[in-house]
Amino acid sequence: MSTQIVARILIKALMAMPAPDFSLCLFLIPERVQMEDQFKTLIVLSHYLETGRFRHFWDEAAKHRNIVEAVPGFEQAIQSFAIHVLSLTYQKIPRTVLAEAINLKGLSLDKFLEHQKANCGWILEGDQSTSQLIVLPPNEFNHPELKKNVADSIPLEHITRIFPILG
């Protein structure tokens, strides 16, 4: 078994988040192989992603550039996952929180925000200061509406049958 190829497969599985590919692949790898440093690093990175600790993820990934740069598009895939998680969580997100989650700042963050504004319906409130808010498009998770559960309601005819018994 080539550990380099296995590591690349695991990196690709990380890129597929939120799909459970990483965990499924990990179950196929013997424990003795998982104890190697590169696999320990990938397991830690996966944990950070699964728990939404994006700043820790980017810090750890920067320390191990040689591992994560083995697959092109890694950074963009993780940024897409972070945006997915944030869009499920926030209606409005502070610019600083978004910047930390996707590991962008300065001009590259400005370009990214303009792209999202033009193509994804994001709205930027305020100037480009740290207090700027980004309004994310509503979805069923970040914009819940009160829904009446029809299965929990009791028809009026059932209630009227109870009244004579109570009286």
Image: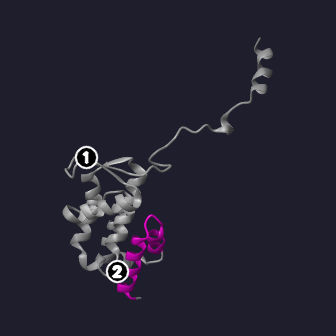
Q: Quadrant of residue 78?
A: bottom left
Say which mark, if any, is on residue 156.
Answer: none
Q: Nearer the viewer, mark 2 or mark 1?
A: 1
**What residue span does the magenta drawing correspond to?**
2-27
Residue 82 in the image: x percent, y percent? Answer: 36, 60
Residue 48: within the magenta? no
- The three-letter code of the residue at mark 2 reads Val
Image height of 19 relative to 141, above or below: below
- Badge 1 crowding class, 10 Å Cα cut-off, few under 14, some 14 to 19, many 20 or more, is few
Q: Quadrant of the N terminus?
A: bottom left
Q: Quadrant of the C terminus?
A: top right
Residue placed under numbered mark 1 in the picture: 126
43 left or right, relative to 157: left
Please tell me which of labels 2 and 1 falls first in the chain: 2
- Badge 2 crowding class, 10 Å Cα cut-off, few under 14, some 14 to 19, many 20 or more, is some
Residue 60 in the image: x percent, y percent? Answer: 25, 67
104 left or right, relative to 151: left
Q: Secondary structure at mark 1?
A: loop
- The three-letter code of the residue at mark 1 reads Gly
Among all residues in the image, which is located at the extreme bottom?
1
Q: Quadrant of residue 68?
A: bottom left
90 left or right, relative to 104: right
Residue 16 in the image: x percent, y percent? Answer: 44, 70
Image height of 166 relative to 58, above or below: above
Q: Secondary structure at mark 2?
A: loop
Seen at 40% across and 54% down, the residue is 87
Residue placed under numbered mark 2 in the picture: 71
Residue 22 in the image: x percent, y percent? Answer: 43, 71
